[in-house]
Image (tube, rainbow, N blue to C red):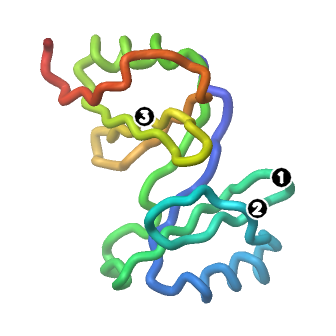
Amino acid sequence: MALIDLDHVNIRTARLAEMVQFYGEVLGLREGPRPGFAMGGAWLYCGERAVVHLVEVATAPNAPTPQIEHFALTAADLKGFLCKLRDLRVPYHIAIVPDLELRQVFLRDPDGNRIEISFQADEQADLSDFDGCAA
């Protein structure tokens, strides 16, 4: 697996409109296209790239809870990466993005931070989740 770049930041918020306005006014990001996810939210673009993903939640997360839900990287060689995770007994969950068919691999670091590694739709592999136990 070869990491390519940092893809986006995902932030949970109970103040979606205020957050969209803040990121637009303060950072110059613009709201743009977003896949048809079941939950509310907004994707904010820098040029042609959606760099901040806001996810709408019913109540604001507690102050001591980080507002960043995960960070994401794009990569190549999905099959090789999943083999490596299984070899190291690192649990993961796979999701497919609606409308885009991107393969997302979610895992956690030793501190529990959630990480997403995103692969293109044409990458083929066993898309079963792995609980970290040897098969």
- Marks 1/2: CA–CA distance: 6 Å
Give SS at disc 3. strand
Indicate the position of residue 46 as horizontal and vertical percent values: 80, 59
> In the image, is residue 56 above or below residue 93?
below
The residue carrying mark 2 is 45
Type of residue at label 2? Answer: Tyr
| Label located before the other in sequence (3 or 2) | 2
Question: Could you say whether the residue bearing mark 1 is in a helix, strand or loop?
Answer: loop
Residue at the location (44% across, 16% down)? Answer: 125
User: What residue lies at 41% left-to-right and 40% top-to-bottom?
Assistant: 95
Distance from the alpha carbon under mark 3 to that under mark 2: 23 Å
Residue 122 position in % (x across, y down): 61, 22
* Image: 94 above or below 133: below
Give the label on residue 37, or none.
none
Mark 1 vs mark 3, CA separation in Å: 23 Å
**Residue 105 bears which disc, if any?**
3
Asked if disc 1 and disc 2 are in contact, CB closer than 8 Å, the reply is yes
The count of marks equals 3
Helix, strand or loop at label 2? It is strand
Res. 34 image quadrant: bottom right
Q: Is residue 114 above or below residue 61?
A: above
Q: Residues within 10 Å of mark 2 (few under 14, many from 20)?
A: many
Which is more N-terminal, label 3 or label 1? 1
Amino acid beneath label 3: Val
- Left or right: where 95 falls relative to 74: left
Residue under the point 51% across and 49% down? 71
Check disc 3: other Cα within 10 Å, few if <14, some if 14-19, many if 20+.
many
Q: Amino acid at mark 1?
A: Glu
Left or right: 133 in relation to 1 = left
Write down the quadrant of residue 52 in the picture.
bottom right
Name the residue nearer the viewer: 46 or 43: 43
Number of the label disc, if any, that sits on residue 48: 1
